[in-house]
Image: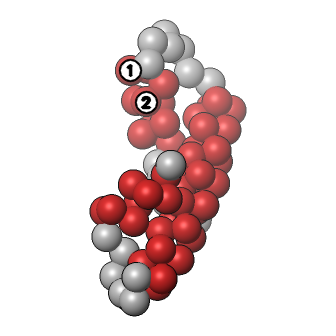
Amino acid sequence: MDKHAIPLAAMERILKSSGAHRVSEESKVALRQVLEDIAMEIGEESSRLAAHAGRKTVKAEDIRLAAH
């Protein structure tokens, strides 16, 4: 069972929509890892922002702030 949150098919669609004609399996795996790492950092920061605001719920504004 794959423990990743983002499917490889989505990585292929992203790469192809960005102009790639062919996409290797390694490139899909690499992009997924990079995006999951970035998402984890944003998720952690947005959770801190929500807690700082006295909330348990992460809002879209927390995500946007954390992404900057």
User: For the residue marked with disc 2, what is the amino acid?
Assistant: Ile
Point out which mark residue 66 bears.
Answer: none
Label 1 Cα neighbours within 10 Å, binned few <14 / some 14-19 / many ≥20: few
Tag 1–tag 2 contact (CB < 8 Å):
yes
**Residue that mark 2 sits on:** 14
Give the percent coordinates (x, y) of residue 36. Answer: 58, 53
Question: Colour mode?
Answer: secondary structure
Give the percent coordinates (x, y) of residue 14. Answer: 43, 30
Instruction: Say if residue 1 shows up in the picture.
Output: no
Above or below — where is 11 with respect to 20? below
Above or below — where is 50 with respect to 63? below
Give the percent coordinates (x, y) of residue 62. Answer: 39, 65
Q: 60 or 30, which is in the foreground?
A: 60
Above or below — where is 61 with respect to 17? below
Above or below — where is 34 with respect to 25? below
Q: Which residue is located at x 63 percent, y 54 percent?
A: 37
Instruction: Say if residue 17 shows up in the picture.
Output: yes
In the displayed structure image, the side of residue 60 where residue 65 appears, left or right? right
Residue 31 falls in image quadrant: top right
Label 2 Cα neighbours within 10 Å, binned few <14 / some 14-19 / many ≥20: some
SS for dot 1: helix
**Residue that mark 1 sits on:** 17
